[in-house]
Image: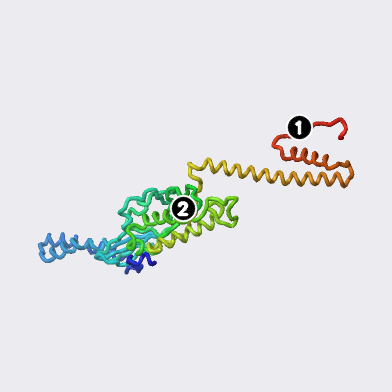
Amino acid sequence: MEKNERIVVVEEKNAPQRSGMPVLILTSLIYLAACVGLGLAIWHRIIPLIVLTSIVILIGWLPYCGLKILRPNEAYVLTLFGKYYGTLKGPGFYFVNPFTSALNPAGNKEGVTGAEIAIGDTKMSMGELVTNNRISLKSLTLSNDKQKINDKLGNPIEIGIVVVWRVTNTARAVFSVDNYAEFLSIQCDSALRNIVRLYPYDVTDDSNLSEKSLRGSSMEIAESLQNEIQAKVEVAGLEIIEAKITSLAYAPEIAAAMLQRQQASAVVDAKQLIVEAAVGMVETALNKLQENEIVHLDEERKAAMVSNLLVVLCGSRDAQPVVNSGSLY
């Protein structure tokens, strides 16, 4: 946390709370009684009662400002005259100090460009996620736009990730950063670039087979990516539950060349396998002919037979047999 020494970290605390239903009923009864009393006071011209009921009517609505309704996995971060008052959590109907105000700076910002949140089958922008003062404590999914990054070998690739995250410390999310949603999106892009530059897209023939690659070591890369993002967003009170690569491909400018390279490598591997198998079959054929004493061949005829068999077995087309009706010699 050396880089974040200048950031004032505010630790989360629970806000004083009480049930809102008794306050709602009592306030409503008092307000109704004040209205009735004001009517009677005016009818009977009782000045003190008129003044008293008028004051009650003017300020009697204040307790309504302290009534808060929370659904599961939602929270209010409350401030009182500019100071952190506490966090209201848990589903229910509550009454808090009516002079407190719920704060969520991210709700006053526009959506992050290219960042998208998915909740179930519904997708929304970052800005739509935080359009009110409630802070969601649910597990959310962030999917940024694909990025073009150079891998360890300098090859440009296009890669996209999806990050599952949630808010664990509401005080840090609100007070430590200006916009925790935008902060997360930027840190995901930064961490992705740092991780991708450490690994090649794929393991080549001249590289170490134990070397990790983006295509072949997706689980290890995802774990490294999760740890990298978590270290960056810890100050914002966010938890990275999971980070996965959703798309991975060479950039269009080199995709055709890399495809030809992969095809050539596949052809070479196939030819090598065919040759190894053909040599084994020729060796078996010669050994069988010699063991069963079917025919005796000198070295020159063996070489010719080996050549013919390799041509037949390794050829890419069907062989056209030629029948020899004369003598072998």
Residue 309 is left or right of residue 205, and the answer is right
| Residue at the image point whose x is 32% and y is 61% from the top | 68
Type of amino acid at the residue the image marks with label 2 = Val
Q: Position of residue 254 (x, y in %)?
A: 50, 43
Name the secondary structure under disc 2.
strand
Residue at 73% across, 46% down: 277
- The mark lying in front, picked from 1 and 2, is 1
Residue 218, image x, y percentages: 54, 54
Q: Nearer the viewer, residue 54 or 6?
A: 6
State how the image is colored. Answer: rainbow
Circle 1 Cα neighbour tier, 10 Å, few/some/many (<14 / 14–19 / ≥20): few
Residue 18 in view:
no
Q: Image check: 174 left or right of 255?
A: left
At 59% from the left and 51% from the top, the residue drawn is 206
The residue nearer to you, when weighing 142 against 16, is 142
**What residue is disc 1 on?**
320
Q: Position of residue 136 (x, y in %)?
A: 38, 58
Q: Which residue is mark 2?
A: 162
Quarter that holds the N terminus = bottom left
Q: Is residue 60 above or below residue 113?
A: below
Residue at position x 36%, y 51% from top?
112
Label 1, secondary structure: give it: loop
Residue kind at label 1, given as amino acid type: Gln
Residue at the extreme right: 293
Whole-number angstrom distance, CA of label 1 to CA of label 2: 57 Å
Q: Is residue 319 above or below residue 266?
A: above
Of the two numbered discs 1 and 2 on the same chain, state the one appearing first in sequence.
2
